[in-house]
Image (spheres, helix red, strand yellow):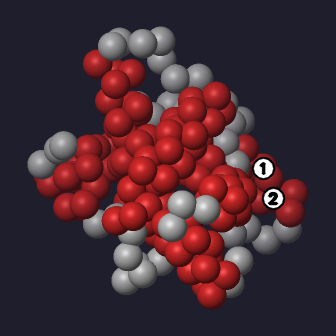
Amino acid sequence: MKDEVSIQWIKKAQAGDSRAFRQIVLHYAKIVNALAFRYTDDAHLAEDIAQDTFIKAHQALSRYQNDAKFSTWLLRITTNTSIDYIRKANRQKASSLNCEDRPIEIPVEGEENQLEMQDSLGKAMSYLTDVERLAITMKHHQGYSIAETAAKLKLNDNACKQTIFRAVRKLRQQLKCEVSA
């Protein structure tokens, strides 16, 4: 979607055009769902988060301003909604999140090697706690700073660094086991 078209759809949606908002949802549904899945590692929960994200975006659309990219704004809502869902699940001591292999893009030569590495990394990520998975995804996939990651996860900076350090150490250990297996 070109920015001009996006801006037109956004302006129409802000004016109350439900068809324009539907076009926005159709365009961004895949990336919103993918990001929610990266945070939760649960396809059904990711769909719920994506739906809530678009509800929140629709409710806040009048406050969106063109000084930031719309996709950035929408993915921030997705991130916040994902974190809220995980916090709620942890507070309610709900059943642990289902850890399935998740596709993560990794630059590796050859399609077969890339698929094997994605599979290995997905398995390794399933050994992380929810907080570790959130922290490493926010820091290394989303590009959040330590301070931003810590603030979102309600940790101090040192605790956030330790969480990321533990996550990286666990991933290295799991990947080392995968390679030697």
| Image coords of residue 147 (percent x, y) | 20, 61
Judge left or right: residue 136 versus residue 163.
Answer: right
Name the residue rendered at 34%, 25% in the picture: 88
Q: Is residue 153 visible?
A: yes
Residue reaching furthest to the front: 16
Task: Assess disc 2: are there few (<14), some (14-19) or many (≥20) residues with their C-alpha within 10 Å of its C-alpha.
Answer: few
| Image coords of residue 128 (percent x, y) | 45, 34
Q: Is residue 48 above or below residue 74?
A: above
Identify the residue position indicated by label 2 in the image: 113
Name the residue rendered at 58%, 71% in the picture: 12
Q: How many labels does the image show?
A: 2
Front-most of 87 and 106? 87
- The part of the image, by quadrant, that contains residue 111 is bottom right
Name the residue rendered at 64%, 28% in the picture: 44
Instruction: Say which quadrant the C terminus sits in.
Output: top right
Q: In this view, does 61 lie above or below 130?
A: below
Q: Can residue 173 be seen in this view?
A: no
Label 1: state its secondary structure. helix
Front-most of 35 and 60? 60
Instruction: Say which quadrant the N terminus sits in.
Output: bottom right
Q: Are marks 2 and 1 in contact (CB under 8 Å)?
A: yes
Identify the residue position indicated by label 1 in the image: 116
> What's the residue type where badge 2 is placed?
Asn
Front-most of 3 and 9? 9
- The part of the image, by quadrant, that contains residue 149 is bottom left
Judge left or right: residue 106 versus residue 66.
Answer: right
Judge left or right: residue 162 versus residue 106.
Answer: left
Name the residue rendered at 33%, 13% in the picture: 92
> What's the residue type where badge 1 is placed?
Glu
Q: Is residue 126 above or below residue 115?
A: above
| Image coords of residue 96 (percent x, y) | 48, 17
